[in-house]
Amino acid sequence: MFGVAPVAAWAVAVQTGVLRHAGTIAVVGSWLGLYLWFALFPIVARRRLGAGAAVRGSWAIDLACAFLATVAMGLVVLLTGGGDGAHDGASYGGYGGGPAWTLALFGVGAVLVGPWCEEVFFRGFLLHALRRHGHASVAWLAQAFLFAAVHPYSAPTLVGVGAVGLVLAAVARIRPTLRAAWLAHGAFNALAFAFVVAAALRLAASGFLGVALELEHRADAQVARVVRVVDGGPAEGAGIAVGDVIVSIDGEPPGRDGFTTFLATHGPGTPVAVQLVRDGETLVRAVTLAERP
């Protein structure tokens, strides 16, 4: 037996956290599922993890494999996702800004707990079980597909996540334990987490426009429709209203993240010209960015 019931409980708990965007639920569910697996099937669990080899194995070789795998995964993501995975990962894990302790909790989950639990499940239990009951190449592709499926990022990034799953499977195959794969997974997530922290710090110091936007893709250009205006904010003071379509700010059209990148380079007190369309008429509103509340 492989401990199917405990692992199924683990998977359900993690997916509950994913679908509800509640990272804490995912972390608690991960530890609970692993505890049940070890408690009910200790010998099987140790074999899946290569626990004996983890004690005797070479840390130097594992670290070298982890480093090379991290470089490979970074190249894969750059080629397939353009770096969007870090932003997607923050939303996926449940971090959308807040107190410092929530950022710390997200970091622990993303760098330590998450990679360990996922390696145990995907490259430990799942890959081993699939290889025992089918062809090795099919097992590798199946675990990579499922690994990508439980990371609901944007479509281009999913391709990169699946490729990352293949790289981690290769590391787990080369080394007699999951330690190297866990180190590689954790290092990769640590880099993504560093981007999340940098983006959060940059956003905190950026100028505040005071609107919520919804991107719209049109034949000639991408625009941003105003869906909410913050009471007392700069946009309201300049006469920007819900339903207005913002074409550009200081001549810069919205990107894939709206105007987040633009605002990150313009601090509070910066005057900007907002070009918008209202009822078919093109208007320009002068707005002075404020500090974030």
Image (tube, rainbow, N blue to C red):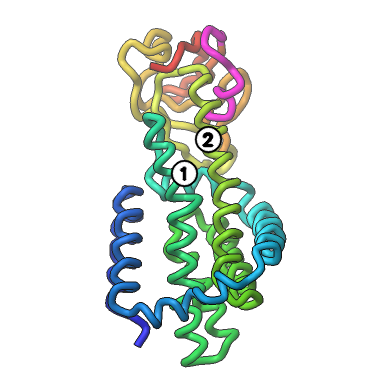
6 or 53, which is in the foreground? Answer: 53
Q: How many marks?
A: 2
Question: How much space separates mark 1 and mark 2, taking CA atoms?
Answer: 9 Å
Q: Residues within 10 Å of mark 2 (few under 14, many from 20)?
A: some
Task: Write the residue at 62% across / 71% down.
Answer: 57
Q: Is residue 274 visible?
A: yes
Q: Earlier in the sequence, mark 1 or mark 2?
A: 1
224 or 44, which is in the foreground? Answer: 44
Mark 1 or 2, closer to the camera:
1
The answer to whether residue 157 is above or below residue 196 is: below
Task: Write the residue at 42% across / 35% down.
Answer: 214
Q: Is residue 255 left or right of residue 246?
A: right
The three-letter code of the residue at mark 1 reads Gly
Q: Residue furthest front?
A: 56
The three-letter code of the residue at mark 2 reads Val
On-image quarter of the N terminus: bottom left
Disc 2, SS: helix
Disc 1, SS: helix
Which residue matches tag 1? 107
Q: Residues within 10 Å of mark 1 (few under 14, many from 20)?
A: many
Q: Say the numbered circle drawn on residue 197.
A: 2
**Image location (x, y in percent) of residue 88:** 48, 47
Q: Quadrant of residue 9?
A: bottom left
**Image location (x, y in percent) of residue 230:** 34, 19
Q: Are marks 1 and 2 in contact (CB under 8 Å)?
A: yes
Q: Is residue 84 visible?
A: no
Q: Tell me where the magenta segment starts and ends, as one range.
A: 260-271
On-image quarter of the C terminus: top left
